[in-house]
Image: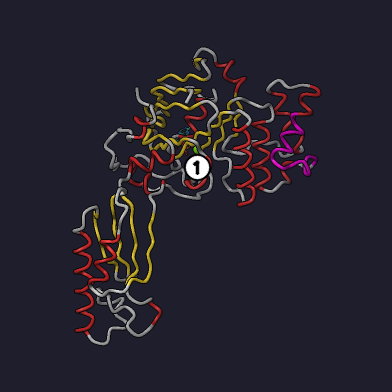
Amino acid sequence: MTPYITVEKLTKKYGELTAVDNLSFTVGENEIFGFLGPNGAGKTTTLNVIATLSDFDRGEVNIAGYDLARDEFKIKSLLGLVPQEIALYRSLTAAENVSLFASLYGLRGRALKKAVDDALEFVGLSDVRKKYAGKLSGGMQRRLNIACGIAHKPKLIIMDEPTVGVDARSRDNILHSIRTLRDEGATIIYTSHYMPEVQQIADRIAIIDRGRLAAIGTESELLGFVTDRKSVTIGIGPAANAGGAAGAYGVSGTVGLAGATDSADAGKAAAKVAGAAADIGALPGVKRARYVPELQEMHIDIDLSLTDISPILNIFIARDISVRSFAEEAPNLETTFLALTGRELNEGGEPGGAAERNIDGGNNSTNGSGAVAQGAVRGGERR
Ligand SMILES: Nc1ncnc2c1ncn2[C@@H]1O[C@H](COP(=O)(O)OP(=O)(O)O)[C@@H](O)[C@H]1O
Ligand SMILES: [Mg+2]
């Protein structure tokens, strides 16, 4: 990775509130860098500093060899910003909006006209170029917002939650466009609080929480260092809706006992399953086995390195317990985030909708205060 942006110990306060707290990370040249964190994490604040729109209290930012504190105008000329809040002139047409923004970056005459045509084409809005921005659908306004930020073909593109509030088709269209921009040579910082999107598009990902870096790396690095286990779910007994002996392995008194003919049967079945759980839990490579009577499922956490799970199945066979289904759940970024921060990302929220999220509650991070997860070291971010 050739570094393109280096952020070093960046701190930005709003009065008493430290919105960005000693944040350091590197963005590689020509990569899509995913910037992930819940509302209020400090994403927009960080991007506004990088985009030279906001001052900061401490730290250094270097972009393409320029020091932000000294060469602000050099950096301005390299970048295009797609802001979180849609910034369009409602009473100008789509084309006029793009033209206005591109001219602010210095384009004139034929070059300007071509840039406008290209940008509208790029986001799929050529057909509505003469429509007033205020008359476009939300998804189209989002796409126009992007066109305005990229028409001048910036080397660095900063996108702050560009897909909030758009329909699935516009979202796919936008994500596809972003990859094209990367393939054409741009470096892109892409911010979202929506996990699947970042997972889908980013080459590397930084997870920030409460203004601090919680983890950084490729998707597989992030998954690998947070979790050393995966889970296996085994459905046992007849399907719950099969009637008859359904629920015969139920353990809880209120659920899962439907089909048991008498309490002695139920007691035996429960003992059988409890015994199986204990045996499985004692197998090498198994971290934990737990029966969930409501679902008639055995939930088993195993080491990622455990590749042969036949000893687990043998226990069911030996105890004459029928196996109905089998599913393996790979670790995902959602659980990674939870493990790192002790909190869940609020998926799919609207802009600002959850901005009041409590960000200054106690530090319940399972990662220890201020520690950056291991992937950062593997990713070469720490010096
Ligand atoms: N102009 C401002 N004045 C005061 N506080 C602000 C301002 N902008 C953002 N904040 C606060 O800083 C924190 C980080 O906000 P922000 O950078 O917008 O987070 P994100 O983009 O990750 O949702 C939040 O607690 C937010 O309320
Ligand atoms: Mg934001």
Q: Residue at x 33, y 52 (%)?
A: 230
Helix, strand or loop for the magenta stretch, by majority: helix
Q: Residue at x 64, y 51 (%)?
A: 169
**Image quarter of residue 210:** top left
Residue 161: x %, y % from top left: 54, 40
**Which residue is the extreme one toward the bottom?**
261
> Which residue sits at x=60%, y=25%?
155
* Quadrant for the C terminus in the image: top left
Using the rendered view, name the quadrant where residue 236 is placed. Answer: bottom left
Q: Please, is residue 361 above or below residue 279 in the view?
A: above
379 up-or-down from 161: above or below: above
Q: Is residue 348 magenta?
A: no
Location of residue 108 in the rendering, given as x and y in whole percent from the top left corner: 77, 21
**Residue that badge 1 annotates:** 198
Query: Residue 208: where, in percent of width, then height?
Result: 41, 36
Q: Is residue 267 left or right of residue 132?
A: left
Tell me where the magenta segment starts and ends, as one range.
Answer: 115-130
Q: Amino acid at mark 1?
A: Val
> What kind of element bears circle 1?
helix
Is 301 in front, or is 198? 301
- Is the residue indicated by label 1 positioned so its CB lies within 8 Å of ligand 1? no
Whether 120 is among the magenta residues is yes
Rendered location of residue 105, percent (x, y): 68, 22
In depth, the one of 172 and 97 nearer the eye is 172
Question: Around disc 1, counting alpha carbons within 10 Å, would you say few (fewer than 14), some (14 to 19), or many (20 or more)?
Answer: many
Along the viewing direction, whichever of 139 and 273 lies nearer the viewer: 273
